[in-house]
């Protein structure tokens, strides 16, 4: 049966969301200098901890999705999407997506005592799965012995470098379960990746002590689904920055005695990109609101990821090319957005995987 899409969702931003956007943008403007972000590629991560401390604790963003009863803000995916869009606009190297969205969502229906410290920004968690793992992907399951000690390895885990708690899917006698392991009890080996603003690490457990925290596979897939739905907003933020920065540059860059932005061919490329960004905005917003309301989540997520993943890459490629020579330099931040866009393109499921999932959801048969 073909899934039906709801038309009753309110996609307009509220005043609270607009105020939240302004607050996050102000903080990022003051504390997320592109030069400091670029320094991550040289091994200097001095910008990460202070920035996350302000965003997580002072603004309370770490607890957006956590109920007020356990110390959170009691907000929804709508507000989280606004935050992620602004983080994408700044290519901010903070673990909001991995900790405050994915790991926190895994724990929401549990009675874990981790939720309070996570909401307060006192702890950072990461779900120990490869960055490319999507909501419908096969899940890695590590082994656990009778004493609750976890063993096994997982590669390319996002957020593990910043985390002090690792949420580990393990294969138990009753199926998949989730155990919490202190990051200090695991071997976390950072790896050099294309996008160093979301650092990856290979994680190995060798009889690491653990505690049960969540019911099982459903909790893990819920966290991955939330991450995929809201990642589209980050990708939108990347694309919007690229468009706006490129337009601003082409209004002042002169060639052959004319402003470059006045050439018809350039106007057409920018118009096409602007239309695509508007379409991406609609797709990302629908995915966030659908997640907040709990309706059409799978379809909305698949549409948003299939479109926004490629949109961010296209926008970043256009930004680099239309900036000319300066766009190819290390000093200009365009390369940060291209790298983030390319890494996000495979994060939480590739566009192709989401298109295949969408085809199944709407009963569209694959070509013979």
Image: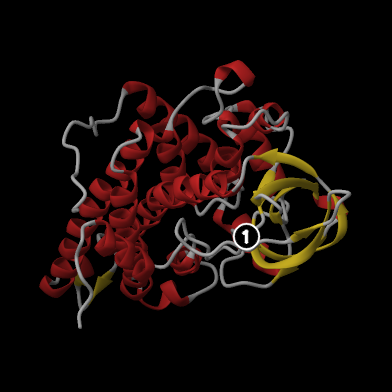
The residue located at (59%, 16%) in the rendering is 69
The residue located at (55%, 46%) in the rendering is 102
Judged from this view, the residue extending furthest toward the left is 264
Camera-side residue of 230 and 92 = 230
| Residue 133 percent across, percent down from the top left | 53, 62
| Residue 263 percent across, percent down from the top left | 14, 71
- In the rendered image of this protein, does residue 121 appear above or below residue 252? above
Judged from this view, the residue extending furthest toward the front is 173
Question: Can you identify the residue that label 1 sits on?
Answer: 129
Q: Residues within 10 Å of mark 1 (few under 14, many from 20)?
A: many
- In the rendered image of this protein, does residue 100 appear above or below residue 257? above
Camera-side residue of 329 and 217 = 217
Camera-side residue of 26 and 339 = 339
| Residue 44 percent across, percent down from the top left | 73, 60
The residue located at (56%, 18%) in the rendering is 68
- In the rendered image of this protein, does residue 20 appear above or below residue 300? above
Judged from this view, the residue extending furthest toward the bottom is 368
Quarter of the rendering occupied by the C terminus: bottom left
């Amino acid at each position: 049966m073909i899934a039906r899409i709801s038309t009753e969702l309110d996609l307009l931003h509220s005043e609270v969301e607009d105020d939240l956007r302004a607050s996050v943008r102000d903080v990022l403007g003051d504390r997320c200098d592109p030069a400091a972000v670029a320094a991550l590629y040289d091994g200097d991560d001095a910008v990460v901890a202070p920035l996350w401390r302000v965003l997580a604790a002072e603004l309370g963003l770490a607890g957006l999705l956590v109920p007020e009863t356990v110390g959170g803000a009691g907000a929804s995916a709508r507000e989280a999407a606004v935050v992620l869009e602004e983080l994408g606009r700044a290519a901010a190297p903070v673990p909001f997506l991995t900790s405050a969205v994915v790991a926190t969502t895994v724990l929401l229906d549990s009675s874990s005592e981790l939720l309070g410290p996570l909401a307060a920004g006192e702890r950072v968690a990461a779900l120990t799965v490869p960055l490319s793992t999507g909501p419908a992907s096969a899940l890695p399951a590590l082994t656990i012995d009778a004493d609750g000690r976890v063993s096994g390895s997982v590669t390319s885990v996002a957020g593990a470098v910043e985390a002090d708690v690792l949420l580990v899917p393990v294969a138990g006698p009753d199926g998949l379960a989730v155990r919490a392991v202190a990051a200090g009890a695991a071997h976390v080996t950072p790896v050099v990746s294309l996008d160093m603003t979301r650092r990856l690490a290979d994680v190995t457990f060798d009889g690491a002590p653990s505690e049960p925290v969540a019911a099982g596979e459903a909790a893990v897939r819920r966290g991955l689904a939330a991450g995929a739905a809201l990642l589209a907003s980050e990708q939108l933020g990347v694309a919007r920055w690229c468009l706006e920065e490129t337009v601003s540059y082409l209004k002042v860059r002169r060639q052959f005695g004319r402003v470059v932005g006045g050439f018809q061919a350039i106007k057409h490329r920018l118009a096409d990109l602007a239309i695509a960004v508007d379409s991406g905005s609609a797709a990302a917003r629908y995915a966030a609101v659908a997640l907040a309301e709990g309706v059409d989540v799978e379809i909305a997520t698949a549409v948003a990821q299939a479109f926004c993943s490629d949109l961010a890459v296209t926008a970043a490629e256009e930004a680099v090319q239309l900036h000319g020579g300066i766009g190819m330099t290390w000093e200009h931040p365009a390369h940060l957005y291209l790298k983030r866009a390319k890494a996000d393109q495979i994060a939480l499921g590739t566009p192709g995987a989401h298109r295949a999932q969408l085809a199944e959801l709407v009963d569209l048969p694959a070509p013979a």
